[in-house]
Amino acid sequence: LLLSVIVCPVTFPEELEIQNFAYAYTTWALLKGRTEQSRQDLIAHRINTYVIHGGFTPWPTFDKNGEWQGLDWTRLDAQIALHATAKCLLLWSGLEIGDRVNRLTPEDGPEFPSEEWKTFAARWAKELGDGMVARGFGYDDWALYPVDEPSGRRARIVRAAGDAIRAGDPQIRIFENPYGAASQADMELMAPVVDIWCPALNIAKDERLDFCREHADEVWMYQVLGKPSHPLKVFRLAFWEAFQKDLRGYGFWDYANCGGSVWDAYDSDRHDYSVVYDGDASELIPSKRWEGYREGAEDHALLTLARGLGSDAAGESVLADLLEAPDAGKLSDARRRLIRAIVEGQ
């Protein structure tokens, strides 16, 4: 058997243009004792944007007299050190789920959404913004993510918190990720305070995507993906769709969350989402889905390079044909054409 290997003189940029994120909380049981391995694994799979769990995002405390006690940066500082290579941090506040993360009405603090609460939330935003600047972050290097998947009550929290954040530090960017339950009224309510829309893919396929484009500087997208999600058709080709729609970011839920053993999808009443498996005490084993994500991120880099050279290898007809009828052979051919166009155009 004769094997021929062709090595093309194409180098991926050190920093990809697209914001790549996976919900990869370091609190998950699967990552216990594997923090450094997961850090290296995320970088190797082209993750450059990190969602910081609300438990690490500083939230004010008050004494029994209702006096402000300031922000404790200890846990966020540890996350900043862990993700030192990050292009962007998304600080989730967890205001929508009450006592499990950050209380919307802090213990011994002002009641949401009173005028006193608005004043305190503006002060929180000011201290948070000043603290991030003091740690070397520009305002383009991070964003606040007040609640997850807003609709209904959550959308109202976004608007109230967003108004207070704008009053405290108008330079802070606000990120939100609406999904199918978000109505047009919800979107319109939130729009004045959202800088980065990151709709679920089902919204990115309807008229709400146009609304996002009209009302924010940046539009990303995300998906909730589990073990049944196809490595090529779902994980990898999402990057081709993000490129086709000219979206600035793409991410998914999630990296390492599972109900029981990650090897058994039926040992818990919770769904297994994890794209990695545990091996020995320090090992993380990638799934086909996780490798599909990495290949998709690298495909996006090739598409970006080819577009910069004016090549039709990254043209609409190529993208539409591949996305309408996904096929592994067709994808391989498209990737080869991209590489050939880049080599010839350099």
Image (tube, rainbow, N blue to C red):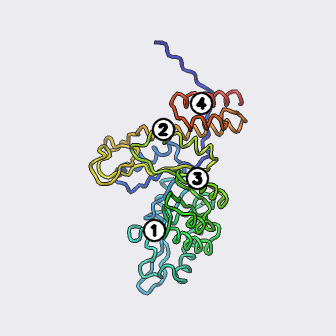
Who comes first in sequence, dot 2 or dot 4?
A: 2
Question: What residue would you read off at disc 3?
Answer: 206
Compare residues 32 and 108 and report the one nearer the observer: 108
Disc 2 from disc 3: Cα separation: 25 Å
- For badge 1, the amino acid type reads Glu
Q: Is residue 260 visible?
A: yes
- For badge 2, the amino acid type reads Gly
Dividing the picture into quadrants, the one containing residue 126 is bottom right
Dividing the picture into quadrants, the one containing residue 161 is bottom right
Residue 332 disc label: none
Disc 2 from disc 4: Cα separation: 16 Å
Q: Mark 2 or mark 3, which is nearer to you?
A: 3
Who comes first in sequence, dot 4 or dot 3?
A: 3
Task: Name the image quarter holding the N terminus.
Answer: top left
* Element carrying mark 2: helix
Task: Name the image quarter holding the C terminus.
Answer: top right
Q: Around disc 1, counting alpha carbons within 10 Å, would you say few (fewer than 14), some (14 to 19), or many (20 or more)? A: many
Residue 334 disc label: 4
The x, y position of residue 119, in whole percent, is 56, 80
Q: Mark 4 or mark 3, which is nearer to you?
A: 3
Who comes first in sequence, dot 3 or dot 1?
A: 1
- For badge 3, the amino acid type reads Asp
Residue 292 disc label: 2
Q: Are marks 2 and 3 in contact (CB under 8 Å)?
A: no
Q: Are marks 3 and 1 in contact (CB under 8 Å)?
A: no
**Identity of the residue furthest to the left in this view:** 267
Name the residue located 32 percent from the left edge and 52 percent from the top edge. 259
Name the residue located 63 percent from the left edge and 37 percent from the top edge. 303
Disc 3 from disc 1: Cα separation: 26 Å
